[in-house]
Amino acid sequence: MSHLMNTYARLPVAFTHGAGAWLWDSKGKRYLDAMSGVAVNSLGHAHPQFIAALNAQLSKLIHVSNLYQISEQEQLADQLCALSSMQEVFLCNSGCEANEAAIKLARLYGHNNGIEMPTIIVMEKAFHGRTLATLSATGNRKVQAGFEPLVSGFVRVPYDDIEAIKQVAAHNPNVVAVLVEPIQGEGGIRTLDKHYLAQLRKICDQYNWLLMLDEIQTGIGRTGKWFAHQHTEILPDVMTLAKGLGSGVPIGACLAAGKATGTFKPGNHGSTFGGNPLACVAALNTLNIIEHDHLMQNALTIGNFLQQGLRARLGNIPGVVEIRGAGLMIGIELNKPCTELVKLALAQGLLINVTNDNVVRLLPALIFSKTEAQQLIDILCPLISEFLSQPA
């Protein structure tokens, strides 16, 4: 019996090693990994160049305090700003920490502008983390239940509803920022209208709000651009990153631009481990390999191949509501809860996930090949077809 706290409904499998898009369990069985650690293992498993860079850094320096200059951290900040056109970077260890930093930055920005009760607009079905502030920003009552009182200072609107934003703007003078995912991951791979972010950018400029994008799941090449908002012409004031940034080594980032820059001063925020040399080397090499190996183009190519193949096999089957996503972030919405598909796929040697109860979520590594994509289609589609054919 494990002494771990019972915080996860774990599947009955333990992996011992991996290579590329494949994992092996303790019994020697091989699995096609279509989740990549929930969008974390961008480079797959045991990427030789990545491992060599980590090993080299391990022999030099793992951690020094942020009381001192860290050259790897400065290099990473420079590279992230070059890729994003943002101007400042705070480095931390996870997505919820990056979002905590964004929430604190927005509140301080509001106070600096004379607003005593700064309020942030957040979305229904959003997911921003499990700390108290990010939990409060999250739009999922099941995740929040039992942890009240929640943190105040948030007002919630429907996702992809620009009129709802305008209504809040007309009636709430305390708003200082909007926090939104360009694609909702935990919310069911829900996408925005192509004009939404541009309209939101205009409203934020009009009211002097910060436009804050949670790109923790959508960022670092997953949708075929470095950041999902780059499919549009807008630039956010704040952007949060984590998951794929370190290819499995914990790291998060909160980036600022424009009117959000200069908000944090020494002493306003910090992190003991944030931006340590090992994590920064992991992130720098992740970015360099994605660029050198053209993995963003691969995400687009393989993502399109997957969506076309899934539509061809599942598109006309009753019970398949929609197949949607961008790049290697794909959701298959069914008309009934389908969490049992996770175990059925596991038995067939395929790792998938179900989110929002009825959406099969696929987040393969950016190194996924066409052959592996076809294997995914060939395993998953019969499982979904058989599942939907069963009486309720």
Image (cartoon, rainbow, N blue to C red):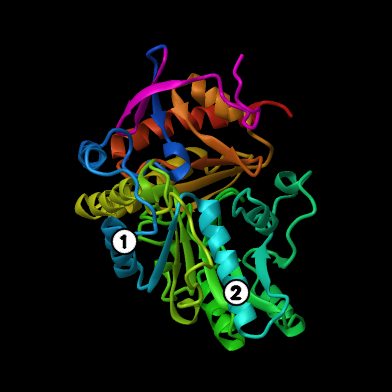
Q: Residue at point 33% right, 64% down?
A: 77
Q: Residue at point 72% right, 27% down?
A: 391
Q: Compared with residue 318, is residue 122 higher up or lower down, i.e. above or below? A: below
Q: Which residues are magenta?
A: 1-26
Q: Main secondary structure of the magenta part?
A: loop
Amino acid type of the residue that numbered disc 2 sits on in the rendered structure: Leu
Residue 108's tag is 2
Measured in 3D between alpha carbons, the distance from the residue under mark 1 to the one under mark 2, in whole angstroms, is 25 Å
Q: Is residue 20 magenta?
A: yes
Amino acid type of the residue that numbered disc 1 sits on in the rendered structure: Gln
Q: Position of residue 307 (x, y in %)?
A: 43, 47
- Residue 55 in sight: yes
Q: Residue furthest toward the bottom?
A: 206
Q: Position of residue 1 (x, y in %)?
A: 61, 13
SS at badge 1 = loop
Pointers 1 and 2 in contact (C-beta within 8 Å): no
Residue 158 position by quadrant: bottom right
Screen quadrant of the C terminus: top right
- Residue 191 in sight: no
Give the residue number, with chain letter if any, for mark 1: 69
Q: Nearer the viewer, residue 269 or 332?
A: 269
Q: How many marks?
A: 2
Q: Residue furthest toward the front?
A: 67
Q: Compared with residue 388, is residue 364 higher up or lower down, i.e. above or below? A: below
Q: Is residue 120 magenta?
A: no
